[in-house]
Image: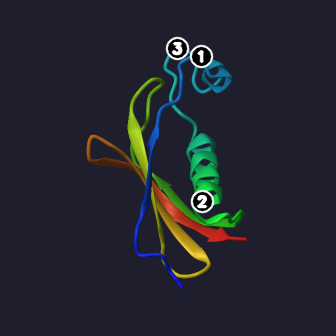
Amino acid sequence: MTDPTPFVRALRFDAAHPSFAGHFPGRPIVAGVLLLEAAAEALREWRGQGVAQVADAKFLAPLLPGEEASLELDMADDSRCRFVVRRDGEVLARGTLEAA
């Protein structure tokens, strides 16, 4: 059965994170793969499920090092989880994960 209550957690990537040295030098942004990894970790924490695949993902605006954002998950059905990353109400990324 699908849980109607979304799971929400705060997101913040420290400016010292090693990925920022190469993504992108002089103007670092949080890599999309880090956002996907955060969504996968949240799904494991919330539902005890891993990710079989990323069904779709859209990255609409950058998240910068040190910025506060939120990650929200909700179950579309028993095997698909939607995620949204927001900063001050603005959608930065969204997509669907297929749970393992």
Disc nearer the start of the sequence (1/2): 1
Q: How is the image coloured?
A: rainbow
Residue sitting at x 47%, y 76%: 3
Disc nearer the start of the sequence (1/3): 1
Q: Is residue 80 above or below residue 90?
A: below
Mark 2 sits on what residue? Answer: 43
Q: Is residue 19 above or below residue 95?
A: above
**Structural distance between the alpha carbons of marks 2 and 3:** 33 Å
Q: Quadrant of the N terminus?
A: bottom right
Disc nearer the start of the sequence (2/3): 3
Residue sitting at x 52%, y 81%: 77
Whether residues under marks 1 and 3 lie with C-beta atoms below 8 angstroms apart, the answer is no
* Callout 2 secondary element: helix
Q: Amino acid at mark 3?
A: Gly
Q: Quadrant of the C terminus?
A: bottom right
Viewer-side residue, 92 vs 50: 50
Q: Which mark is residue 16?
A: 1
Viewer-side residue, 57 vs 68: 68
Q: Which mark is residue 26?
A: 3
Residue sitting at x 58%, y 17%: 25
Question: Dot 2, crowdedness within 10 Å: few (<14), some or many (≥20)?
Answer: many
* Callout 1 secondary element: loop
